[in-house]
Image (cartoon, rainbow, N blue to C red):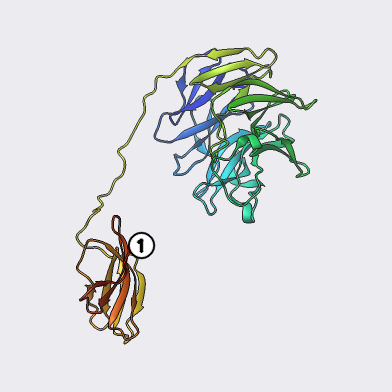
């Protein structure tokens, strides 16, 4: 929401749009090849921070409220940055920085950046050691700037797991005191708590929670501690997933803290905090999207010859003159002096595994596998002649 309550910004299909709070036709603020998401309006309404990969990787960018004067704020080269939110004085942005560890999905840390750029300041690190895959996301300043709220994974254990049960409380909202560094578990319990969103007047904290099979929008009264559901009709949240770009589409308060604007069911809605009445905000978007053909390279997927990248069960013959190994499901021998490689057998009916020379080097024992005839143990002369089955019944390797 803009500070004067006249318009809001949102992202769609990788571009940032502006539309009056009353609805109507949205205006594109970006329209380019960059993937532009998660806009956030500065407290004075003059600038919009957002995430863009236009520099090669997701970083924080800032532009004027009319979409002009784009400039990059964070300078990450390896880690993905998401979810920027302004400090009340408009001088800093707090964001999630995804750090890769042993899995392909980054786990978040909380970092703060000055609007003039720089390396940023780490506010909250991942839990290092065994639990460094647990995520932290959705950071936001309190209305007075004294605190930073964020979503934190509280499940014990080392590894990230998909499809956990959010009703058991996967996530909680933590409050970080910027003066003392103290962290407080602020909202937790059944159904979890994600996406903290403080009201401008400092009286409430809106958040998302799972209620049975529904995703609900709640508010917490910061004076009494009372938690009240406003609606149970949100789209499904991301608590079972990884949430590297946040755990729900971000929502915002009206400047007078009387209502919240949120997205669900394909459109925007405004809900009155006192009465819980909901109004739809009808908008239209006339978008022209640029695209480029994907960069592709010819790859010969079935060449007549190629280098084998992996061999198995390699071993010397007892006299040390020959190497025996398996590659691509068949057995081979290699003369160490000449370097010549030869198939041990000439059959293509089954695969061959686990070869081993006899003590005198005259024979080789190995197993075979056929999807219908199952497995056999065979003995063959070291020169590849006279292969014999020595098992009476087929087996499973």
- Does residue 151 show up? no
The answer to whether residue 332 is left or right of residue 171 is left
Give the tally of numbered discs: 1
Q: Give the camera-side residue of 270 and 237.
A: 237
Residue 165 against residue 120 in the figure, above or below: above
Q: Position of residue 309 (x, y in %)?
A: 33, 64
Given residues 301 and 6, the one toward you in this image is 301
Across and down, in percent, residue 287 comes to 39, 23
What residue is at 30 percent from the left and 77 percent from the top?
364
From this viewpoint, is residue 270 visible?
Answer: yes
Query: Relative to the observer, which residue lies in front, 206 or 131?
Result: 131
Rendering quarter of residue 315: bottom left
Check disc 1 and report the residue beneath it: 395
Note whether 126 is above or below 187 in the view shown.
below
Rendering quarter of residue 183: top right
Q: Check disc 1 and report its element: helix, strand or loop.
A: loop
Residue 149 drawn at (x, y percent): 68, 36
Of the 4 image quadrants, the one containing the C terminus is bottom left
Q: Residue at x 80, y 25 (%)?
A: 224
Residue found farthest to the right: 224
Left or right: where does residue 168 sit relative to residue 347? right
Indicate whether 188 appears above or below 200: below
Q: Position of residue 142 (x, y in %)?
A: 71, 32
| Residue 34 horizontal side relative to residue 223, left or right | left
The quarter of the image holding the N terminus is top right
Binning the other alpha carbons within 10 Å of mark 1 as few (below 14), some (14 to 19) or many (20 upward) gives few
Which residue is rendered at x = 63% and y = 49% of the image? 126
């Amino acid at each position: 929401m803009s500070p004067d309550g006249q318009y809001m910004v949102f992202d769609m299909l990788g571009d940032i749009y502006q539309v009056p709070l009353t609805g109507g036709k949205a205006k594109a603020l970006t329209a380019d090849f960059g993937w532009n998401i998660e806009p956030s309006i500065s407290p004075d309404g003059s600038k919009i921070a957002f995430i863009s990969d236009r520099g090669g990787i997701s970083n924080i960018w800032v532009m004027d409220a009319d979409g002009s004067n784009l400039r990059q704020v964070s300078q990450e080269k390896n880690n993905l940055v998401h979810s920027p939110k302004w400090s009340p004085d408009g001088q800093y942005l707090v964001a999630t920085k995804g750090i890769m560890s042993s899995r392909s999905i980054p786990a978040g840390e909380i970092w703060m950046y000055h609007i003039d750029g720089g390396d940023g300041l780490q506010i909250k690190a991942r839990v290092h050691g065994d639990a460094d895959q647990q995520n932290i996301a959705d950071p936001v300043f309190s209305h007075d700037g004294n605190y930073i709220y964020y979503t934190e994974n509280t499940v014990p254990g080392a590894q990230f797991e998909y499809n956990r049960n959010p009703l058991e409380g996967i996530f909680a909202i933590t409050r970080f005191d910027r003066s003392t560094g103290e962290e407080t578990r602020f909202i937790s319990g059944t159904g979890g708590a994600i996406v903290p969103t403080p009201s401008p007047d400092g009286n409430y904290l809106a958040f998302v929670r799972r209620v049975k099979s529904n995703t609900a929008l709640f508010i917490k009264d910061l004076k009494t501690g009372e938690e009240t559901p406003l609606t149970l009709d949100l789209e499904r949240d991301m608590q079972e997933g990884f949430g590297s770009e946040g755990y729900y589409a971000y929502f915002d308060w009206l400047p007078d803290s009387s209502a919240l604007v949120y997205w669900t069911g394909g459109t925007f809605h405004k809900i009155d905090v006192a009465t819980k009445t909901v109004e739809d905000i009808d908008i239209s978007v006339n978008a022209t999207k640029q695209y480029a053909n994907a960069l592709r390279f010819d790859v010969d997927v079935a060449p007549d010859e190629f280098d084998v990248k992996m061999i198995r069960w390699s071993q010397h013959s007892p006299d040390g003159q020959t190497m025996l190994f398996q590659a691509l499901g068949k057995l081979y021998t290699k003369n160490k002096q000449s370097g010549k490689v030869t198939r041990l057998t000439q059959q293509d009916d089954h695969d061959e595994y686990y070869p081993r020379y006899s003590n005198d080097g005259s024979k080789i024992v190995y197993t075979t596998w056929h999807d219908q005839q199952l497995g056999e143990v065979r003995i063959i002369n070291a020169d590849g002649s006279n292969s014999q089955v020595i098992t009476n019944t087929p087996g499973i390797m």
